[in-house]
Image (spheres, helix red, strand yellow):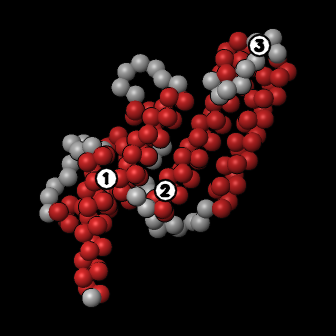
Amino acid sequence: MDTFIDVFTGDKSKLIIEGEHSEKELSEQSEKLITEYVEIIGGASFLSEMSQRNNIINLHIKIEYMKIVEVMIANNDWAYAAEALSQLGFSYFPSEHEKIRKKASSILSMSKYMLERINAKEKPGNSSKMDKNYFARERVMVMSHFGMQIRKNEISAKEYAFMVKRMCEDIKIMNNRKRK
């Protein structure tokens, strides 16, 4: 569960057990982990928040990645710059200097623009922000509901998600009984 919370809050490096992995691989694995959690607990607002957070994380990754590509270009390391762009699905020969330069600049500019648009739309002081504190508060509610201790380093995100779902279902049933 610790890994899930770290990944959800943007630290994809927690997925790496050994070796090196591309950003694409890390993104795919983090999406799978988060999607599995969301599919279990459900909730449209959670899906929306997750999608927004995933977009922000991917934009930050692209921005940093393109900064590295720009350093490669500045060092006339065209083969590595072309390879880096190919990781994003853009195929260039190392000899296509101007195309590589323009594509890197375009991706960087577009990513910064999209990130600024998203940040401008976000409302400050959003009380439902899903950060580490959110998960800590949620875990306390789940522990209280089930009357048990949950050690986040000893439970999987999947197990925890089923507990959250069950708690939500129990609360919904109790609320329906009160209304009758």
Task: Give the label on residue 119, or none.
Answer: none
Q: Nearer the viewer, residue 67 or 28?
A: 28
Residue to which mark 1 is pinned: 161
* Residue 149 spot, x, y in % from top left: 16, 55
* Residue 162 spot, x, y in % from top left: 28, 53
Q: Is residue 69 visible?
A: no
Q: Earlier in the sequence, mark 1 or mark 3?
A: 3
Position above or below: 15 against 50:
above
In the picture provided, is 134 more to the left or to the right than 85?
Answer: left
In the picture provided, is 160 more to the left or to the right than 53?
Answer: left
Position above or below: 74 against 108:
above
Q: CA distance from mark 1 to mark 2?
A: 14 Å
Q: Who's the residue at 56% across and 43% down the image?
A: 57
Q: Residues within 10 Å of mark 1 (few under 14, many from 20)?
A: some
Q: Is residue 1 visible?
A: yes
Position above or below: 4 against 81:
below
Residue to which mark 2 is pinned: 47
Q: Who's the residue at 82% across and 17% down the image?
A: 97
Q: Quadrant of residue 165?
A: bottom left
**How many marks are shown on the rendered structure?**
3
**Tag nearer the camera, 2 or 3:** 2
Task: Give the label on residue 93, or none.
Answer: 3
Q: Who's the residue at 36% across and 57% down the image?
A: 41
In the picture provided, is 101 more to the left or to the right than 142?
Answer: right
Position above or below: 107 against 152:
above
**Of helix, strand and loop, which one carries label 3?**
loop
**Of helix, strand and loop, which one carries label 2?**
helix
Q: Quadrant of residue 143?
A: bottom left
